[in-house]
Amino acid sequence: MNNLDFTSNTSAKTLWLAIKAKLTEIYSEPEAGAMAFWVMEYIYRLPKTSVLADVTVQPQTARLSTVMQRLLAAEPIQYITGVSDFYGLEFFVNQHVLIPRPETEFLVDQIVTEFKNKGSITLLDVGTGSGCIAVSLAKNLPQAKVLAVDISSGALDVAQRNAARHEVKVQFTPMDILRATLEPFPELDVIVSNPPYIRDSEKSLMHKNVLGFEPDTALFVPDTEPLLFYERIASLAMLSLKKSGKLFFEINEAFGQEMRELLEKTGFHSVEILKDLQGKDRIAMAVKREN
Ligand code: GLN
């Protein structure tokens, strides 16, 4: 990384330009510029205004070189810092869990809005990952009892740390939802899930930030069974939800209509499919039929 080998104090702008030039090897010009500002802040504690004011910096070459190597390998910034923001809270993340996405904040917001003044309810989050859904629900619905399951013990460790960090009680249980015998959970009001929903054939469209770093088990499903998690969770929901209990899913935008049909066929009514900020089908909500 010879062009970043500054040996003496240098100007912040020169350093920023050199970092940005290096990052354009794998990122677009605007992305590289924004990331170079992030590096200046992360390593030198210099906000954008100080870079633009061109203050003098001590280069700290070794630290810079480590961070640059990780960025040039396409590692997401959130895994480098170990944290990610979600629904107004900061969550620990590592390679055992997906980096929380804005679409999932929209999912959480539906539940918070609907259940804010409904007193004590019981919720289950299936495939909790970092715990971002379960913990932000527990935080924003303080009367709720929150349960969460995941197949990955690495993910459950992260989720537990996040619950502790935000001082909420969530009951975490290891579970392979596809293989576990479907024991009903007692009397749930809400089941929420953001299960894997990217088809294997869609992998080629994905950025190497995602492919090289985020856990495959949290993302991908076989092309032949794109809805396998939804079918399983909807069946579990029929056994476990109270009368008129509600199911909330994040979904693949290609399957809005199929999701509606699946939910109606399994025993739900009032199915709604909501679009995300890009106008894509992203959230499914449904109410368990009474019978
Ligand atoms: N929305 C995520 C992505 O685009 C996928 C989340 C999931 O598979 N549940 O990478």
Image: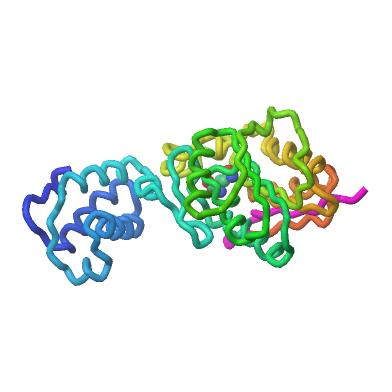
Above or below 19: residue 72: above
Taking the image as shown, residue 135 lies to the left or right of residue 114, namely: left
Residue at the farthest left position: 8
**How is colour applied across the structure in the image?**
rainbow
Taking the image as shown, residue 192 lies to the left or right of residue 36, namely: right
Q: Residue 268's x, y, as percent?
A: 83, 49
As rendered, which of 79 and 138 lies closer to the eye?
A: 138
**Residue 279 visible (yes or no):** no
- Count of numbered labels shown in the rendering: 0
Tell me if residue 288 is in the magenta stretch.
Answer: yes
Q: Residue at x 71, y 48 (%)?
A: 191
Q: Residue at x 56, y 53 (%)?
A: 168
Tell me if residue 234 is in the magenta stretch.
Answer: no
As rendered, which of 280 and 186 lies closer to the eye?
A: 186
Q: Residue 128's x, y, as percent?
A: 59, 44
Quadrant of the rendering where the N terminus is positioned: top left
Q: Quadrant of residue 196?
A: top right
> Which stretch is magenta?
276-291
**Residue 18 visible (yes or no):** yes
Residue at the farthest right position: 291
As rendered, which of 209 and 188 lies closer to the eye?
A: 188
Q: Residue 156's x, y, as percent?
A: 54, 39
